[in-house]
Image: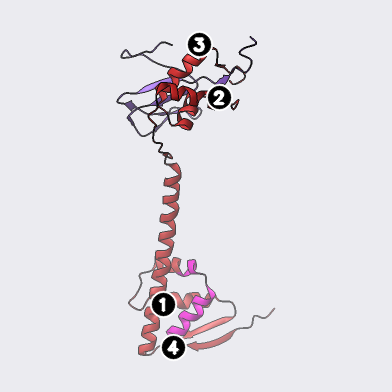
Chain colours: A purple, B red
């Protein structure tokens, strides 16, 4: 799995898990009535990953 | 229909008692907010006006010097009014505090465990054996493990064919 660590690298996904030493307070960003989002900054050894739903392979030996 | 009106001659204290027992607290407070409070509490004119509004009672104010018990009762009434105002203010502050607390993000503290990669892998396998569909963050939170370690182990398990992406979950 590639790991992007260059300045300016971006990540886009429906669900992103993140960990960092410091996470800023969440700010609500309003653009239009229907279009609003939230904003936060992760600092110091920040790590983000696009989440994937995982489940166990039950019939591994048969396949 | 003839309205029955009883006329009573009362002292300022009796007047206050009559009004207080017939009006709710808010009405008395709203009267006090508009008019400057005199040293003896509300101005007599306010009390008389309130008394006039009472159904069937016409109160005639008897002027005269106040006895010490009357002064004490007058002060008591004033303190009760102040108490009501303060209680109202505290209620407002409590409501505002509750709304602020509700808007704050909930913080949950977990202490991460220091496990070897092998131990962590075994625990992750055990967690998946329940048959649940899990995200990296679910595993990290439930097992109290570092997110990066969880991602690395999950990638390894995916390559080994132990776990796979659940296509049923969007």
User: Which residue is pictured at 46% across the width and 70% down the height?
Assistant: B28
Same chain under badges 1 and 3? The reply is: yes
* Front residue of B145 and B138: B145
How many numbered discs sit on the rendered protein?
Answer: 4
**Of callouts 4 and 2, the N-terminal one:** 4
User: Which residue is pictured at 42% across the width and 41% down the height?
Assistant: B104
Q: Identify residue for label 3.
A: B159
Identify whether B108 is placed above or below A37.
below
* Front residue of B67 and B99: B99
**Residue B66 visible in rendering:** no
Q: Is residue B129 left or right of residue B34?
A: right
Residue A7 picture location, percent across and down: 30, 14
The mark lying in front, picked from 4 and 1, is: 1
Asked which secondary structure carries label 2, the reply is helix
The mark lying in front, picked from 1 and 3, is: 3
| Residue B146: quarter of image | top left
Q: Which mark is residue B154?
A: none
The quarter of the rendered structure image containing the C terminus of chain B is: top right
**Of callouts 1 and 3, the N-terminal one:** 1
Q: Which mark is residue B128?
A: 2
**What's the distance in space between the residues labelled 4 and 3, CA to CA?**
97 Å
Residue B149 picture location, percent across and down: 41, 22
Q: Identify residue for label 1.
A: B77
Q: Identify residue for label 4.
A: B62
The mark lying in front, picked from 4 and 3, is: 3
**What's the distance in space between the residues labelled 1 and 3, CA to CA?**
81 Å
**What's the distance in space between the residues labelled 1 and 2, CA to CA?**
69 Å
**What's the distance in space between the residues labelled 3 and 2, CA to CA?**
15 Å
Asked which secondary structure carries label 4, the reply is loop
**What's the distance in space between the residues labelled 4 and 2, CA to CA?**
87 Å
Residue B159 picture location, percent across and down: 50, 11
């Amino acid at each position: 799995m590639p790991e992007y660590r260059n300045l300016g690298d971006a990540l886009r996904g429906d669900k992103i898990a993140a960990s960092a030493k410091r996470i800023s307070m969440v700010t609500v960003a309003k653009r239009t009535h229907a279009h609003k989002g939230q904003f936060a900054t992760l600092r110091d050894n920040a790590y983000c990953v696009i989440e994937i739903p995982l489940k166990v392979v039950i019939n591994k030996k048969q396949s | 229909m003839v309205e029955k009106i009883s006329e009573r001659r009362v002292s300022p204290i009796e007047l206050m008692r009559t009004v207080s027992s017939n009006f709710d607290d808010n009405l008395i407070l709203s009267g006090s907010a508009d008019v400057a409070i005199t040293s003896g509490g509300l101005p007599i004119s306010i009390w008389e006006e309130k008394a006039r509004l009472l159904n069937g009672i016409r109160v005639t104010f008897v002027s005269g010097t106040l006895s010490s018990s009357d002064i004490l009762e007058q002060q008591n009434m004033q303190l009760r009014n102040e108490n009501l105002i303060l209680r109202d203010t505290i209620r407002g502050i409590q409501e505002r505090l509750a709304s602020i607390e509700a808007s704050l993000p909930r913080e949950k503290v977990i202490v991460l465990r220091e496990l070897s990669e092998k131990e962590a892998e075994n625990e992750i396998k055990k967690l998946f054996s329940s048959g649940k569909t899990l995200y990296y963050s679910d595993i990290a939170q439930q097992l109290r493990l570092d997110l990066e370690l969880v991602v690395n182990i999950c990638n390894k398990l995916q390559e080994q064919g132990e776990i796979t992406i659940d296509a049923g979950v969007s």
